Image (cartoon, helix red, strand yellow):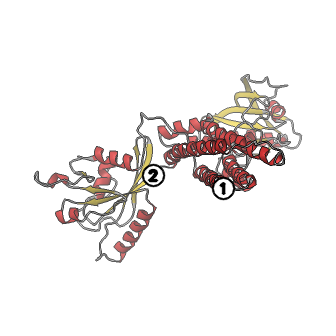
Amino acid sequence: MLSSETIAAVATASGSGGVAIVRLSGPDAATIAAQICAREKLTPRYAHYVQFYKIDPQTEVTTGLVIDMGLALYFKAPSSFTGEDVVELHAHGNAIVCEQIIASACVLGARRARAGEFSERAFLNGKLQLNQLEAIADLISSNSEQAARSAVLSMQGVFSDEVNALLQKLIYVRTLLEAALDFSDEDIEFADHDRIEKELRYTLERLAEIYKVAAEGARMQRGVTVVLSGAPNVGKSSLLNALCAEQRAIVTPIAGTTRDLISVDLNINGVPVTLVDTAGIRSDAGEIEREGIARAETARAQADLILQVLDNNPTDIDQLSDSDGIVVVNKADLLSEQASRLAGVVYVSATERTGLDQLRSAIAERLDISSDDQQTPFAARQRHLDALQQAQTAIERAMAQLAQAELPELIAEELRLAQQSLGEITGEFTPDDLLDYIFREFCIGK
């Protein structure tokens, strides 16, 4: 779907820099760019060293005033990012220079692009599937090497290929069912019960495998939150400082020093981890401290993992709880050699910096974070996980109906719903409001 409008925007990050790129896309991109460069025409896929001229808004011709000097690159449709004629004007990285170039382009008939409009046109013109475009945004915002690699895998179509293979399998089974419906009056059995069950069971197994990889990829992109929780003075703040190797939290012998949430960013096996220190929980807290405890409870409720920190007091150790998290005994350097150590408990010393590697390994294991030498999962988002789950539920309903010898029409309808859910991942079936939401998160010029 080629647009009749030509759009223009800065495609590089804002601020000063060596180079900035003004991008134009649309039917008049080459003509407009050629006028700004005072050239008769631009040769596709050739880097022209040119001067950029200011265009008079009254006469729509060059004023002879040079805005800057740089490169002009023309990508002729459909061999471009958007599938339309695209021109990139490489100027020096100055906001005033870029604004003058865009203003000149608008005088000549272009308009300023909306956020994400270049990517939207790439999707509408069939250059990339929806989840591949989302992976571009994920790559731009990646804050770890693993996250960047997973985004590149999705950009390359690894996730799309997996989803498309499932879609083809569903289409095949639906074809068997539709054949049975179309020839229901004939004495021919087109849809073999055992074959359909086998195909659906295989599809469910592949769905589960893909969901597991997608969930890990989603976690890698958004990161995880780990909360330090426990009574005052058990060493939560000291442990936070030790894990991040910085003095981020104030540490004193006075109980209740930490009143507010303190967070630091870590990297465990390539996955971004936000470690949050919280106020110590006790019953005789003052008014301000109670507010800190309330915030600590909120952080605990929202955490992916809780580290229940205790000191080396034998009474505390005997009262271990919080089975959903990891129990961490701090100040282990003060334990006697005869003191028993309980299985499943991580013993550390924040002051001596011992046991920290074991704690990191325990966090990675509990959160199912793969190590750097394992295969990188493709990037995914929560909406993709939701769609996979919806498809799984629909196929499970279809299998239940198949087992109960329900009408083929009912089974086919469930498979249609499963196909629609999977199609929302790639953009084959996508409501307009979802498209608007996704492309709004892109920057101008993307």
Residue 136 to residue 321: above or below: above
* Residue 276 image-quadrant placement: bottom left
Q: Residue 2: where, in percent of width, then height?
A: 83, 39
Q: Residue 9: where, in percent of width, then height?
A: 72, 42
Residue most extreme to the right: 59
Tell me the element at label 1.
helix
Q: What residue is disc 2 on? A: 224
**Nearest the eye: 94 or 350:** 350
Q: Left or right? Give the position of 192 relative to 252.
A: right
**Nearest the eye: 438 or 63:** 438
Residue 211 to residue 261: above or below: above
Q: CA distance from mark 1 to mark 2?
A: 39 Å
Residue 41 to residue 165: above or below: above
Tell me the element at label 2.
strand
Q: Left or right? Give the position of 346 relative to 46.
A: left
**Nearest the eye: 56 or 414:** 414
Q: What residue is disc 1 on? A: 401
Residue 420 to residue 292: above or below: above
Q: Is residue 315 visible?
A: yes
| Chain-order first, disc 1 or disc 2 | 2
**Nearest the eye: 401 or 85:** 401
* Residue 51 image-quadrant placement: top right
Q: Which mark is residue 369?
A: none
Residue most extreme to the front: 187
Q: Quadrant of the N terminus?
A: top right
Q: Quadrant of the C terminus?
A: top right
Q: Left or right? Give the position of 78 relative to 18.
A: right
